[in-house]
């Protein structure tokens, strides 16, 4: 049974198909709000209504696997539930046929070959915010040109440059002109009216991510973000500031983790560094103390207190090996260490893992992994789980605060982002080291000491 907001969308689309109006709809429903179920039931109704004629319904998704495949499975299940088990058939691995009518599932990936298909009944664009405007305009939209097909774009908002946002703004303008509703928007609060479990889940996500986290804003509140700008707001920088003092040695019974951002190798002349410019890239180690404020062993995301920074500028990686091992092993007894293993960092990460064991986790920066790193860092700040020591007037603290102020963000397609400091304004060593120490603390579970083991894992 569909909820009222789902029925409202299905009714509008069904009437446009039935009356051959050829309208284009945009539908924004909060993540996990039942968009796919609604689409499957709409497809089932339309196939049943047209099963005596050789007509096509076409649905495209950003990827064939898993998105199109999941949509096909859902439609098959709905047909079976409706008593059509044995009446529908699969064709060519991407078509479901009921009588003479077909539902064709295609990939909107840039490399997918889709030209030549015709949409007679309905054209659906799933996760429209992740579909290329050019791909849609050149290859999918023409599929309904000769049939005046009704088209529907589903998704959640991202930024103001996506295909979904463009269709949405066009629809809102058309609504102002003729009063015909073409855009449907249901944020998480609307969905939660009909599902208490969903209410509990999203409330938890709001606490974990923060009300203004980019993912919560777009996926649940359905508010688009614009371009980019400062990575941390003034409010977030204030939240990051803690009340504890910096420490240079551990306390008994505390658990420590580390994040290591490695400097790029400098060009050499005759085996020596050309200069010792203090503004060059640095290797930064951030030490965090895990704080299980929940008071039990079920806390999955502990608070992290940043209590120490180390920085080396103009020093080659091999020269740091012994010092890094001593600091991480003998000084802080770190339980988990996440180290930048991208490019020239690979041999350092490999050395540390051999010296310190499995608690060293190499991190390879890619567009996707860095995006996730940035989102997790924002979530830790927004939820109050990450705090840095009080200002001590040190060069490390001043550089740390400066990088937090200069940090920028850039939002990209497919719900990804980049965060960085503009090279013209300085480096981002402390910023990346901070993000890596948050990664080190993610999902860390407190365990009771057994047989001489320390809490959180086995001893060195």
Image (cartoon, rainbow, N blue to C red):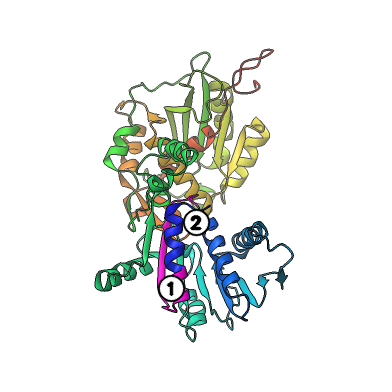
User: Is residue 107 visible from the viewing direction of this image?
Assistant: no
Q: Nearer the viewer, residue 405 or 101?
A: 101
Q: Residue furthest bottom?
A: 146
Say above or below: 296 vs 314.
Answer: above
Q: Label 2's element?
A: helix
Which residue is label 2 attached to?
Answer: 35
Measured from the top left, where is residue 329 in percent x and y? 59, 25
The mark found on residue 16 in the picture is 1
Check residue 441 in the rendering and tell me which mark sits there, or answer none: none
Quadrant containing the C terminus in the rendered view: top right
Q: Which image quadrant for residue 87?
A: bottom right
Residue 154 to residue 283: above or below: below
| Residue 304, above or below 414 | above
> Residue at the location (55% across, 24% down)?
298
Q: Nearer the viewer, residue 317 or 220?
A: 220
Dot placed on the residue nearer the N-terminal end, 1 or 2: 1
Rendering coords of residue 296 (x, y %): 53, 19
- From the viewer's perspective, tell me whether residue 327 is left or right of residue 75: left
Membership of 21 in magenta stretch: yes
Q: Residue 118 magenta-drawn?
A: no
Question: Callout 2: 10 Å neighbours few (<14), some, many (20+)?
Answer: many
Residue at the outermost right position = 86
Query: Who is closer to the viewer here, 222 or 245?
Result: 222
Within 10 Å of disc 1 (Cα), the crowding (few <14, some 14-19, many 20+) is: some
Q: At x 38% / y 53%, what residue is drawn?
A: 222
Q: Would you say 272 lies left or right of 385 here?
A: right
Q: Report the span colored magenta.
A: 14-35
Q: Viewer-proximal residue, 370 or 356?
A: 370
* Residue 87 at least partly seen: yes
Q: Quadrant of residue 103?
A: bottom right
Where residue 380 appears, as percent x and y from the top left, is 43, 36
């Amino acid at each position: 049974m569909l909820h009222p907001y789902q029925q409202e969308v299905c009714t509008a689309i069904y009437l446009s198909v039935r009356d051959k109006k050829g309208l284009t709809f945009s539908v924004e429903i909060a993540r996990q709000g039942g968009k796919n179920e609604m689409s499957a039931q709409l497809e089932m109704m339309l196939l049943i209504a047209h099963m005596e004629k050789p007509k096509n319904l076409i649905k495209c998704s950003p990827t064939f696997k898993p998105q199109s495949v999941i949509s096909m499975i859902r439609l098959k299940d709905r047909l079976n539930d409706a008593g059509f088990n044995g009446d529908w058939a699969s064709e060519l691995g991407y078509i479901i046929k009921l009588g003479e009518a077909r539902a064709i599932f295609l990939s909107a990936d840039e490399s997918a070959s889709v030209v030549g298909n015709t949409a007679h009944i309905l054209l659906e664009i799933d996760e429209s915010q992740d579909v290329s405007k050019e791909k849609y305009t050149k290859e999918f939209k023409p599929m309904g040109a000769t049939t005046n097909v009704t088209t529907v774009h589903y998704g959640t908002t991202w930024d103001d440059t996506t295909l979904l946002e463009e269709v949405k703004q066009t629809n809102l303008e058309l609504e102002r002109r003729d009063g015909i509703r073409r855009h449907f928007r249901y944020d998480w609060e609307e969905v939660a009216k009909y599902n208490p479990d969903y209410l509990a889940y999203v409330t938890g996500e709001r606490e974990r991510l923060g009300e203004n986290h980019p993912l919560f804003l777009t996926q649940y509140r359905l508010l688009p973000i614009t371009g980019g700008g400062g990575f941390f707001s003034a409010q977030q920088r204030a939240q990051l500031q803690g009340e504890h003092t910096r420490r240079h040695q551990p306390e008994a019974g505390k658990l420590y983790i580390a994040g290591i951002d490695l400097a790029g190798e400098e060009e050499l002349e005759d085996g020596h560094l050309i200069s010792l410019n203090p503004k060059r890239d640095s290797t930064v180690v951030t030490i965090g103390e895990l704080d299980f404020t929940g008071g039990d062993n079920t806390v999955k995301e502990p608070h992290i207190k940043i209590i120490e920074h180390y920085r080396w500028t103009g020093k080659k990686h091999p020269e740091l090996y012994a010092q890094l091992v001593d600091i991480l092993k003998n000084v802080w007894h770190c339980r988990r260490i996440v180290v930048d293993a991208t490019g020239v960092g690979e041999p350092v990460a490999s050395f540390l893992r051999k010296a310190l064991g499995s608690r060293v986790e190499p991190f390879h920066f890619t567009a996707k992994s860095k995006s996730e790193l940035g989102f997790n860092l924002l979530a830790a700040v927004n939820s109050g789980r990450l705090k840095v020591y009080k200002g001590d007037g040190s060069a490390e603290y001043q550089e740390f605060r400066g990088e937090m102020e200069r940090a920028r963000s850039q939002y990209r397609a497919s719900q990804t982002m980049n965060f960085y400091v503009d090279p013209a304004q300085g480096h981002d060593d402390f910023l990346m080291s901070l993000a890596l120490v948050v990664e080190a603390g993610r999902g860390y579970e407190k365990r009771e000491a057994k047989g001489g083991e320390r809490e959180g894992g086995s001893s060195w």
